[in-house]
Image: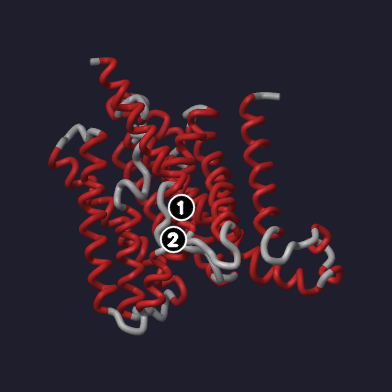
């Protein structure tokens, strides 16, 4: 068996196991046979298909979106610390979503897609602003410059969110609950809301898999290899921002998934984006399904925000990557 086949078999197996654990474990344990025989336990079947399955599917789509977006951003910027959270893209998406909730915006033509649309607009504008400001400060776009720029924009956008929360009235509970990050009680409508954007954004990034491989050698080398660098950048940024905006719109701000999953996948299976992107997609779905399972069972009957669990995992990994990079730079010096 080839290494690539083993990678996909492992990722798919872990995903299937996590899905079953997510739908079966809880205050009510679901028998396996309910999957194909609703009559075996009608109550368990209703819990499975109306509550847990949409929650697990939504968690999987959100995790997959953030992970593949993170993998693309890291490849584009040649920086393992780049992800939607550290670059401020998640904060921009949050501002777009909170503004929609705060002002009660609803576009008749768009309908239920109003929230993810404004969230994606916020994500795209933030990504453009971060890249533009970082290039003004340092044309070489060094790692430290990008991360600091992302922190600056995240802080500013966070203050805008705090302002809207402070001014809000009846919407306060909805906004606060959304900001904490959760896939609880969302249901199939939220799955329908995010699914088209996951497909479109993932396809956009998948079409750039070879271009991302070429960009690892630098923009000049990529140009010599026939890559339209400017077009590729726009497609990657647009696809990644679309995925981030859609994920934030349905689940709130969930950090570090786009950092941890691509990094671990790259360490184990290599940096070829032809496989890194789909493997990150699968592994991201697995990670967030497991994190959601932990969040809702660790202190039953209460639930933790899923962002708390991902932060517990992501913060140490972020520290490790940053330490490793700084040490390697010091060693070369």
Q: Can you give x and y, in whole percent of width and height, for residue 143 in the image?
A: 26, 34
Mark 1: give few (<14), some (14-19) or many (20+) Cα within 10 Å: many
The residue depicted at 41 percent of the width and 66 percent of the height is 116
Q: Which residue is labeled 1 in the image?
A: 201
Indicate left or right for 308 with 295 as reference. left
The residue depicted at 34 percent of the width and 40 percent of the height is 82
Q: Can you give x and y, in whole percent of width and height, for residue 303 in the image?
A: 53, 64
Q: Secondary structure at mark 1?
A: helix
Indicate left or right for 214 with 160 as reference. right
Q: Which residue is labeled 2 in the image?
A: 246
Mark 2: give few (<14), some (14-19) or many (20+) Cα within 10 Å: many
Indicate left or right for 330 with 192 as reference. left
Q: Return the mark for residue 127.
A: none
Indicate left or right for 179 with 333 as reference. right
Q: Secondary structure at mark 2?
A: helix
Quadrant of residue 231 within the rendered picture: top left
Q: Quadrant of the N terminus?
A: top right
| Most foreground residue, 199 or 119 | 119
Labels 1, 2: front one = 2
């Amino acid at each position: 068996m080839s290494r690539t086949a083993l990678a996909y078999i492992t990722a798919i197996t872990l995903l299937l196991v996590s899905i079953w654990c997510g739908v079966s474990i809880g205050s009510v344990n679901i028998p396996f046979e309910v999957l194909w025989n609703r009559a075996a336990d009608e109550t368990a079947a209703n819990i499975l298909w109306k509550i847990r399955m949409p929650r697990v599917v939504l968690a999987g789509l959100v995790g997959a979106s953030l992970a593949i977006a993170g993998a693309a951003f890291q490849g584009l910027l040649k920086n393992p610390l780049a992800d939607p959270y550290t670059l401020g893209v998640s904060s921009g998406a949050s501002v777009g979503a909170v503004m929609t909730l705060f002002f009660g915006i609803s576009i008749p033509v768009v309908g239920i897609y109003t929230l993810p649309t404004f969230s994606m607009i916020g994500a795209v504008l933030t990504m453009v602003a971060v890249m533009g400001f970082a290039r003004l400060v340092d044309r070489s776009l060094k790692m430290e410059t990008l991360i600091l720029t992302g922190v600056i924009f995240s802080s500013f956008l966070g203050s805008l969110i705090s302002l809207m929360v402070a001014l809000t009235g009846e919407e306060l509970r909805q906004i606060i609950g959304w900001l904490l990050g959760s896939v609880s009680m969302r249901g199939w409508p939220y799955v329908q809301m995010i699914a088209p954007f996951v497909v479109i954004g993932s396809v956009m990034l998948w079409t750039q898999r070879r271009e991302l491989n070429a960009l690892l050698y630098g923009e000049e080398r990529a140009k010599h290899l026939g890559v339209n660098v400017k077009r590729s950048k726009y497609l990657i940024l647009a696809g990644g921002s679309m995925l981030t905006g859609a994920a934030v719109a349905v689940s709130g701000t969930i950090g570090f998934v786009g950092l941890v999953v691509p990094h671990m996948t790259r360490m184990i299976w290599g940096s070829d984006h032809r496989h890194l992107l789909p493997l990150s997609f699968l592994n991201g779905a697995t990670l967030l399904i497991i994190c959601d399972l932990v969040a809702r069972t660790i202190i039953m009957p209460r639930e933790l925000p899923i962002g708390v669990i991902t932060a517990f995992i992501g913060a140490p990994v972020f520290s490790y990557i940053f330490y490793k990079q700084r040490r390697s730079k010091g060693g070369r010096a």
